[in-house]
Amino acid sequence: GAPIEADISKLEEGQMVIVEWRGQPVWIIRRTKAQLDALPGQDARLRDPKSTNTDQQPAFAQNEYRSMKPEVLVLVGLCTHLGCAPQLHAELKPEPFDADWKGGFFCPCHKSRFDMAGRVYQGVPAPTNLVVPPYSFIDDNHIMIG
Ligand code: FES
């Protein structure tokens, strides 16, 4: 599949836009400072907090934000368990109740949870972090995916 270009000039803090690349949904989210600040505190509860599984992201995203620019998160929007579509739960706490929920993604099919970097929590069916696709910035407002 050819690379696609996404315009994020209208993407506000906390918002997500979904584009299609190679028949897959790709999420682009402009994370808030609070969401970024919450990431390090989740490490102890995650299966692969340091993104050591190099199949799940390009080398440029093997960092604590799993992204090229900290605020802009780009992920393939498919659960790494059986491919359902996880939902963005920025604040709403998913069931079963998690008092420490700091925002992230919840897969309704078998209740896998991921943080705001797409990192999978321990104790859920999904085996790995969500996939970060290859991408690059054309300029501040345009991303090339693929
Ligand atoms: Fe997402 Fe099973 S497909 S938890």
Image (spheres, rainbow, N blue to C red):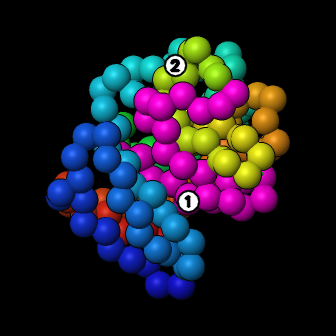
**Image coords of residue 59 (percent x, y):** 56, 48
- Give the amino acid at mark 1: Val
Instruction: Please provide percent x and percent y for residue 4.
Output: 39, 77
Residue at 65% over, 47% down: 107
Q: Nearer the viewer, residue 117 or 16?
A: 16
| Residue 66: numbered disc | none
Q: Tell me the SS state at disc 1.
A: strand
Residue indicated by mark 1: 76
What x and y, as percent, mark residue 121?
69, 31
Of 68 and 35, nearer the camera is: 35
**Left or right placement of residue 115 versus residue 54 in this view:** left
Outermost residue, bottom side: 1
Q: Which residues are magenta?
A: 72-96
Nearer-N-terminus badge (2/1)? 2
Residue 77 seen anywhere in this rendered image of the structure: yes
Q: Residue at x 55, y 59 (%)?
A: 76
* Amino acid type, residue under disc 2 in the picture: Pro
Residue 73 is inside the magenta segment: yes
**Position of 57 relative to 120 (above/below):** below
Crowding at label 1, few (<14), some or many (≥20) Cα neighbours within 10 Å?
many
Residue 40 is labelled as 2
Instruction: Indicate the quadrant where residue 51 lies.
Output: top right
Eyeballing the image, is 75 above or below 145? above
* Residue 51 appears in the figure: no
Q: Main secondary structure of the magenta part?
A: loop
